[in-house]
Image (spheres, rainbow, N blue to C red):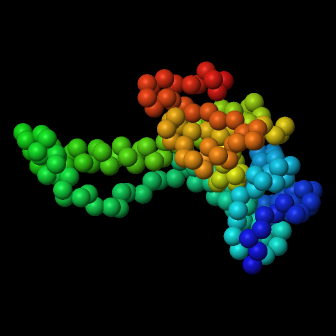
């Protein structure tokens, strides 16, 4: 099975196959948004994500579409988050009781539960931000690459403008930052992690 990218194939052929595949699958709906994101990838093949174990161009396109619509159909507003499945470390109780000796066992449990809930919320915040921006920017011709269907790019336009979105200034790893070097990919983050300043004006 090949792990190469689909850049060897003609862009018109890719769009043709994609529309045909999406039209014949109930969980997919061919529209301008998916067409533009796919077309931008065709124009800049390095944006195509690596998809392992595909055997033909049609197979790759099918898996790419499943990634896109999987991301869209399971966006935060359309799914129910799972309950936290891990167990808290008992040593946390000891540390909290030393720091806050007047706190009751119930109080310690409330702190731990609130902390775990806060961490869970932070984990989905980036996805919520992405959905919020997608809802508000589509009118201006910016489309979300749902399901990580473009390499390190979250939004694009028909003209090929590329945008990478982060929730906080410290939420980017080295691989995300290195991919922009020598490319037209722009980056925006919602809030400065050090001082709490928001950057909505810059996004506008």
In the image, what residue occupies the spot 74% across and 36% down? 142
Which quadrant of the structure image shows residue 8? bottom right
As drawn, 173 above or below 170: below
Please provide percent x and percent y for residue 97.
11, 46
Camera-side residue of 154 and 22: 154
Q: Is residue 149 left or right of residue 96?
A: right
Camera-side residue of 119 and 185: 185
Confirm whether residue 89 shows in the render. Answer: yes
In the image, what residue occupies the spot 77% across and 48% down? 37
Please provide percent x and percent y for residue 28.
72, 58
In the image, what residue occupies the spot 87% across and 56% down? 15
**Residue sitting at the far left:** 102
Camera-side residue of 82 and 146: 146
**Residue sitting at the far bottom:** 1
Q: Is residue 19 left or right of residue 184?
A: right
Q: Is residue 150 left or right of residue 85?
A: right
Which quadrant of the structure image shows residue 190? top right
Figure quadrant of the C terminus: top right
As drawn, 144 above or below 200: below
Please provide percent x and percent y for residue 16.
90, 59
In the image, what residue occupies the spot 78% across and 53% down? 46
């Amino acid at each position: 099975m090949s792990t190469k990218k689909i850049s060897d194939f003609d862009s018109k052929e890719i769009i043709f196959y994609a529309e045909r595949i999406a039209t014949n699958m109930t969980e997919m709906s061919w529209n301008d948004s998916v067409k533009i994101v796919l077309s931008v990838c065709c124009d800049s093949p390095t944006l195509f994500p690596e998809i392992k174990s595909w055997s033909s161009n049609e197979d790759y396109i099918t898996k790419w579409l499943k990634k896109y619509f999987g991301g869209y159909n399971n966006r935060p507003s359309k799914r129910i988050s799972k309950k936290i499945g891990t167990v808290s470390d008992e040593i946390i109780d000891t540390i909290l009781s030393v720091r806050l000796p007047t706190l009751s066992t119930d109080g310690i449990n409330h702190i731990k539960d609130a902390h775990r809930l806060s961490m869970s919320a932070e984990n989905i915040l980036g996805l919520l931000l992405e959905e919020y921006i997608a809802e508000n920017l589509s009118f201006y011709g910016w489309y979300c690459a749902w399901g990580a269907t473009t390499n390190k790019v979250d939004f694009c336009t028909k003209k090929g403008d590329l945008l990478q979105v982060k929730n906080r200034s410290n939420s980017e790893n080295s691989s995300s930052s290195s991919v922009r070097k020598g490319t037209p990919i722009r980056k925006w983050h919602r809030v400065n992690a050090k001082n709490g300043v928001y950057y909505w004006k810059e996004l506008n």
